[in-house]
C-alpha cells in the first residue's frame, strides 16, 4: 500500500496530542433537528499520528479490505476498514484520550459516552463512501452523535437532507486533525458521503467515535 503523505507544514512541529474543545467548537444548525460541530485542528502532530496508524502490523492497524454485493456482483468496498468494538484497545493512546475528551465535552447533551471507534483508510481519490446515514442501530430512531476525527490528506465530506435536492448539499473539507461531529437527528434525517475525486489527493484516515448501539 502506498501511503505517501504530503503533510501540513504547521502540523509537523507539534507532538501528537489534543487541543482543547471548550470554546473552540463551532456549531452549524441544519434542518429537521440536525446539526454539525466543527473543531478544526483538534489533533496536533496529526501527520505523525497518520504515519503510525497507516503502517500495518503490530505498529498500527490491521486494515481490512471488505467485499460487498452491488448490482448482483461482488465488489471491493472502496476503502480499508477496521472497527474497534467497545472493549477493544484502540491502536494509539491519543485515540483513547480523544474518546474520553469527547465523552466529557458532550456528556451534558449526549448523556452517555462514546464507546466504539470505526476507522476508514481512503488510499487515494478513488476511495470513497456513498451517501448514507449511520442507521444500523439507534441512529435510525433516536437522536445521537457520531464524532469524526480526520487525519492525513483533507477530503470533502458532503451532507444533504435525505434524498438530496438541488442546492442543499453542505461541503466540509476535513483532514490534518480536524474534528467534525454530526448530532441531533443527523443520522436519520440527513445523509453524508465522501465522494471520489479525480484530483490527485493523498491518503486520509477517518476515525468515527460512536455511542453504544449506534453504527
Ligand atoms: O470518512 C468519513 O469521515 C465518513 C465515514 C462514514 O461516514 C462512515 O464510516 O460511516
Ligand atoms: Fe457514516
Image (tube, grey):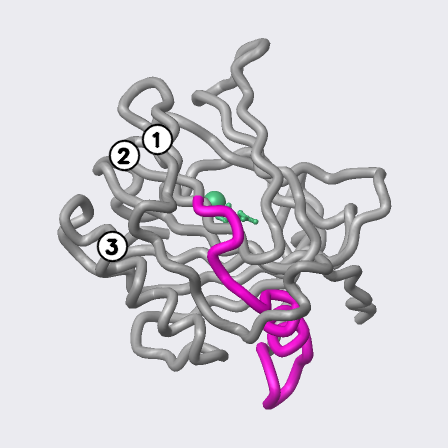
Q: Which comes sooner in the sequence, label 1 or label 3?
A: 1
Residue 2 locus on image (x, y percent): 82, 68
- Across and down, in percent, residue 150 comes to 55, 54
Whether residues under marks 2 and 3 lie with C-beta atoms below 8 angstroms apart, the answer is no
Compared with 112, 45 (above or below) is: below
User: Residue sitting at 30 percent across and 41 percent down?
Assistant: 139
Nearest the viewer among 64 and 8 is 8
Q: Kindly identify which residue carries mark 2.
A: 184
Q: Which residue is mark 3?
A: 105
Which residue is painted at 54% across and 11% down in the image? 165
Q: Secondary structure at mark 3?
A: helix
Residue 49 location, quadrant: bottom right
Residue at point 39%, 35% (across, down)? 36
Q: Are marks 1 and 3 in contact (CB under 8 Å)?
A: no
Q: Secondary structure at mark 2?
A: strand
Left or right relative to 111: residue 153: right
Identify the image quadrant of the N terminus. Answer: bottom right
130 over 147 or under it: above or below: above
Instruction: Say which of marks 1 and 3 sits in front.
Output: 3
Q: CA distance from mark 2 to mark 1?
A: 6 Å
Judging depth in this view, the residue of 11 and 103 nearest the camera is 11
Q: How many marks?
A: 3
Q: Earlier in the sequence, mark 2 or mark 3?
A: 3
Q: Are marks 2 and 1 in contact (CB under 8 Å)?
A: yes
Question: As drawn, is 202 to the left or to the right of 141?
Answer: right
Q: Position of residue 182 (x, y in %)?
A: 38, 40
Q: Disc 1 to disc 3, how far (Cα)? A: 16 Å
According to the image, label 1 marks what residue? 35
- The magenta stretch is 39-61
Give how far apart the Cα atoms at labels 2 and 3 are. Answer: 15 Å
Q: Along the line of sight, which residue is nearer the eye, 183 or 163?
A: 183
Among the 4 quarters of the image, the one containing residue 8: bottom right
Amino acid at each position: 500500500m502506498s501511503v505517501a503523505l504530503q503533510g501540513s507544514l504547521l502540523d509537523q512541529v507539534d507532538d501528537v496530542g489534543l487541543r482543547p474543545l471548550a470554546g473552540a467548537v463551532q456549531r452549524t444548525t441544519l434542518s429537521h433537528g440536525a446539526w454539525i460541530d466543527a473543531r478544526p485542528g483538534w489533533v496536533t502532530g496529526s501527520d505523525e499520528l497518520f504515519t503510525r496508524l497507516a503502517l500495518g502490523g503490530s505498529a498500527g492497524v490491521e486494515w481490512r479490505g471488505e467485499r460487498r454485493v452491488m448490482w448482483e456482483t461482488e465488489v471491493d468496498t472502496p476503502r480499508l476498514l477496521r472497527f474497534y468494538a467497545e472493549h477493544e484497545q484502540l491502536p494509539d493512546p491519543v485515540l483513547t484520550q480523544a474518546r474520553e475528551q469527547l465523552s466529557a465535552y458532550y456528556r451534558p447533551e449526549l448523556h452517555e459516552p462514546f464507546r466504539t471507534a470505526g476507522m476508514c483508510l481512503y488510499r487515494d481519490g478513488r476511495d470513497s463512501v456513498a451517501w448514507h446515514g449511520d442507521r444500523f442501530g439507534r441512529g435510525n430512531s433516536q437522536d445521537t452523535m457520531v464524532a469524526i476525527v480526520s487525519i492525513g490528506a483533507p477530503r470533502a465530506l458532503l451532507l444533504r437532507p435525505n434524498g438530496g435536492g438541488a442546492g442543499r448539499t453542505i461541503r466540509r473539507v476535513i483532514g490534518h486533525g480536524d474534528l467534525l461531529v454530526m448530532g441531533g437527528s443527523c443520522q436519520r434525517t440527513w445523509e453524508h458521503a465522501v465522494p471520489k475525486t479525480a484530483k490527485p489527493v493523498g491518503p486520509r484516515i477517518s476515525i468515527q467515535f460512536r455511542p453504544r448501539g449506534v453504527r
